[in-house]
Every structure is written in structure tokens, then in C-alpha cells.
Image (spheres, rainbow, N blue to C red):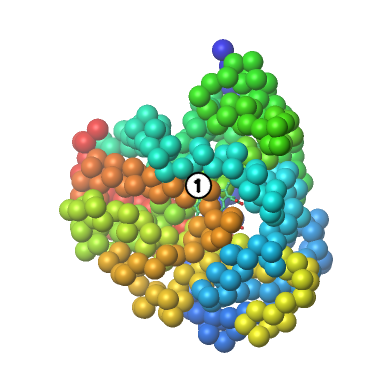
Amino acid sequence: METVPARDDSAGPGYDPMRQFSQLAGDVRDPYPMLADLRETTPVLEVSLDVRTGQGPFDAKAPKLPALFTVFSHEYARQVLTDNVRFSSAGYAASMGQVMGRTVLEMDPPEHQRYRALVAGAFRARVLEQWNDTVIGATVNELISAFAADGEADLIRQLTFPFPVRVISRILGLPEADWPHFLRLSTQLIAIMRDWDGALAASRELRGYFAQIIADRRRNTRDDLVSQLIEAEVDGQRLTDEQIYPFLLLLLPAGAETTYRSSSNLLFGLLTHQDQLDAVRGNRGLLPQAIEEALRWEPPLLNVTRLATQDLELGGVPIPNGAFISVSLGAANRDPRRYPDPDAFDIFRDRGQHISFGDGPHMCLGMHLARLETRVLLNAVLDRLPGLRLNPAAQDTHIHGLVFRSPPDLPVLFDPGHR
Ligand code: HEM
């Protein structure tokens, strides 16, 4: 028996999470020429950004930022991400930390390793295989079955957007009836730099929601991640509810938004490059390299941030202790020193590891899950939607965004009837 009542009232009927996600992405179509210029002229750039006026995209209550630098080249991006002594992750405490609590994202060593280790086991590639058919395959097939007979669909709204939220909710063991409500709160939570009070309210509500889930799992342990966290120990001590919340508050936004956007970008890349779509359709062994190339070409998340822990120099530019450093994953992934012809989507290119999952100690914990979900999704799409192509009636299919990037919609046609 669940202790949490079914409640999706606040998620509908007028609520449209897709609209909020689309607004978050922003409407910049192609930032890459600008990023290329910046990478060539100023691989490490001091940015003048004053958010104190409340002008621009930020809520006036958002924290005031100190000196800000942006790193554009692959070489310097890696230097920052792999050195967590000079470049701390503590800066996230002032933004995401306000609504999520103390997550692994904002921890430095040695605390970071201790807490990351608590959930790392659950996200190992081998362990995740257990979810392959039962959770991931079942979820994707359920979604495709709802439109496979129609001959047309919007692959974002009907497939890639709902898919990872459902997977992570199942891995956490959340009751299905709560998913829409949970999605609304999570969407509000990560919109923190645009709506500070809304994000704080969502955070309070989510904690209340998780308090009931945790209380239930303390009484009845199950085979899910919440139960695993309840039984985990740090320095011989079980975690308190206050220590468990941040894990739960981070996992959904971290795992759902990025994966929905990256699988959408892969579909966009293949649907706009028919020869490569045909190649993958004919040889599914090409899927892993297609997934990596789409991540390099159009990463769903364009920047991560660090805080300088001392006065230092990077690329000849002096950076003061306490400065914020934004690492442009998007610019680094298209650095021509590393990837010849970097703007081309080419699943056959010689692979150099992209930086879309970050690098170093904070490298994405969920990358194996993201890859597995995308592989299962693509295989199901290719198996069940023969003749898949962009709907020619839709003239303006594109990827947009400056912080997050993905297509707002992906209208397609296919041969119907393969339920
Ligand atoms: C394609 C999909 C994904 C992308 C592009 C992505 C990207 C990233 C990046 C760039 C970081 C590093 C942040 C930093 O260094 O500041 C990160 C960290 C993280 N990601 Fe992902 N992510 C994806 C999917 C997932 C999934 C599916 C999950 C889990 C369900 C997840 C959970 C996390 C967590 C917990 C961290 C923090 C790790 C730490 O601080 O040690 N991510 N992700």
C-alpha cells in the first residue's frame, strides 16, 4: 500500500511542462559561430555580467555573481574540470544548492567521494542492465504503442520528453500516479534563475513529498534507490532524511532533462542526415557511435561552472580567488584542434571523447543510464516506426537554446500499423 496519494491535479489541465522547458532553452538557433569566434580569439574570457539590476534573464533575487570567466577551448575546459583542487564545485551552493540542498554536485573532496560512492553502484553500466527490459524497454514501448498506429507524431512531446522522467521515477520507486505532479515540481525547481520564489516553493513541496516516500520505505524496504539510500552509511552512520533529500532532488532534473534533450538531438541529427539514418537502421552496431557523435555535436547542456580556490592563471589570463568560471562544453566539443570539421554531424568520424558529460571527479554519474536509455529508445523507434522521416509540412524544425539545447518539436511521419 502506498502512503502517497495519487495527485496530478496541480499538473493539469492547463499546465504544459513542455512550454516551460522550451522557454528555458531560449530561442538562440545557432550559437556556434559566436562560440567559435570566442574560442579562437579569447579561449579564456573575462565576462562582464551584472545581475544586481535584475535586468536580463535573471530574477533580481538570484545571487549576485563575483568575477566571471568563460573557458571555450577543449584544452582549458579539461584542465578546469579535472582539477578540483584549484577549481571547486562549491559555486553550485548559491544556485542549485538553494533548492536541492547539499548535493554531490557542489561537494569537493574528500566529502564528494564519500557521498558519490553511496549511489555510484546503482549507476554502473553492469547494474543498469537489470533495468533494460523491465523498466527502460517497457517504458519506451508503452509510449510508442500510444501513437504507432497513427502514421504521424511529435517525437518530443509523445516520446523523448516523457520517457526519461518515467524511467527515473521507476528507478526511484515513485508511484505512477504521482509522475505528472512530480514532473511539474521538478520543472519549477530547475527554473531557479528565472523564478526564484517558485523554485523555493517547489523545493519545499518536493521535500514534503519525499518525506512520505522515505517514511514508507523505512517501514517497507523495496528494491529501489530510495530504499538503498535509507540503508546506506557514511562513516558508520545511516543517512538522515535531510541528507537523502538532495540526492532525490538532484536525480530527476539531472537525469530527465538532459537525457530528453540529448536523445531528441540525436533523432534530429539522424532525421536531417538521411544517409546516416539509413546506415544506423541497417546496422544497429553503429548506434553507440551515433549516440556519442550527437552528444558531441549538440550537447543538451552547454555550460558547467567552477569557483577558483586561489589566484591562478589559465591560458595567460589571471583569475582571482573566488571567481566563477563557466566552462563552455559546447565550444570545447567543436574545437577544431580536437575534431576536424567540427560543425559536421558525422557518426563515422574518428572518435575523440567529447566533454558533454563533463570530465574529472564530477563526470556525470548517470552517463551509462543516459546511453542505455538512448540506445533502447532508438532501437524501438527504428523497429516500430518504419519509413520514419521528418514531416515535410513542418517547415521550421530546428534545435535552439543557449543554456540547454534541443528541438522544441520533432514532427514525423512513418508507415502506420506496427503496434
Ligand atoms: C545525456 C544525458 C546527460 C548529460 C549530457 C549529463 C551531463 C552532466 C554533466 C556535464 C555533469 C557534470 C557537472 C559538473 O561537472 O559540474 C553531470 C553530473 C551529474 N549527472 Fe548527468 N548528464 C546526463 C544524464 C544523467 C542521468 C541520466 C543522471 C542520473 C539519473 C545524471 C546524474 C548526474 C549526477 C548525479 C551528477 C553529479 C555528479 C557529481 O557531482 O559527482 N545525469 N551530468
Front-lying residue, 355 or 115? 115
Q: Is residue 211 in view from this perspective? A: yes
Q: Does residue 25 appear left or right of residue 141 in this picture?
A: right
User: In x, y percent, where is residue 112?
Assistant: 66, 49
Q: In the figure, 272 relative to 412: above or below?
A: below
Mark 1 is on which residue type? Answer: Gly
Q: Which residue is labeled 1 in the image?
A: 366
Q: Does residue 286 appear left or right of residue 323 in this picture?
A: left
Most distant residue in the top direction: 1
Front-lying residue, 36 or 329? 329
User: In x, y percent, where is residue 85?
Assistant: 69, 64
Q: Is mark 1 within 8 Å of ligand 1?
A: yes
Q: In the figure, 412 relative to 180: above or below?
A: below
Query: Can you say which quadrant of the picture contains the N terminus?
Result: top right
Most distant residue in the left direction: 282
What number of labels is visible?
A: 1
Residue at the image point whose x is 28% and y is 37% from the top: 148
Front-lying residue, 383 or 60? 383
Q: Does residue 339 appear left or right of residue 29 in this picture?
A: left
Give the quarter of the image for residue 274.
bottom left
Residue at the image point whose x is 68% and y is 54% from the top: 109
Q: In the figure, 149 relative to 354: above or below?
A: above
Give the quarter of the image for residue 279.
bottom left
Residue at the image point whose x is 69% and y is 80% from the top: 313
Query: Can you say which quadrant of the picture contains the C terminus?
Result: top left
Query: What is the secondary structure assignment of the residue under circle 1?
Result: loop
User: In x, y percent, where is residue 20?
Assistant: 58, 49
User: In x, y percent, where is residue 56?
Assistant: 71, 66
